[in-house]
Amino acid sequence: MSDDENTLLLGRAQGRNLFWKDNRLYVRWPVNICRLIWLTAASSYVNVLLAFVPLGTIAGARSWNPTTIFVLNFLAIIPPSVLLTFVLAELSAKLGPTWKGLLSAMLTNSVKLIVSLYGSGTSKQRANN
């Protein structure tokens, strides 16, 4: 065993390939996509709420109780707003405070607007029934 500083401590198993470094595109791309999805989902505990995205869509398509649809979609909108906050913080480092303020005003308020409009729409439906 070499005493080189760059030598792996545990070594690699013989014959073990990393699929995301494979030269074949039909192997590398699907594995990279799955790996990216996993890294994104595992990056924050809030991403567990992404499971509510298909539930909210199914609830709306199947005409469930409006309150249930609202709650499911409200829970589904939390992870994108957290991700949006992260993206705005990263962009502000490059663009500066003026652009950060402008983008923040436009994009973060859109989440609040969607929730408030959808919430008022479901309350009007209940009032009409």
Image: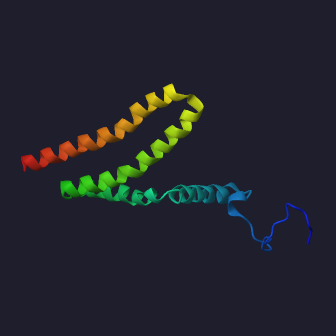
**Residue under the point 36% across and 58% down:** 52
Is 25 rendered above or below residue 81? below
**Residue under the point 31% across and 52% down:** 73
Looking at the rendered structure, the number of numbered marks drawn on it comes to 0
Corner quadrant of residue 22: bottom right
Corner quadrant of residue 58: bottom left
User: Depth check: 75 or 69 in front?
Assistant: 75
Q: Which colour scheme is used?
A: rainbow
Q: Report x, y in % for residue 39.
A: 57, 57
Q: Report x, y in % for residue 15.
A: 79, 72
**Residue under the point 40% across and 31% down:** 105
Residue extending farthest right: 2
Quadrant in which the N terminus is drawn = bottom right
Does 64 sit left or right of 107 as displayed? left
Residue extending farthest bottom: 14
Does 7 sit left or right of 79 as displayed? right
Q: Report x, y in % for residue 20.
A: 68, 59
Mark yes or no: residue 92 visible. Answer: yes
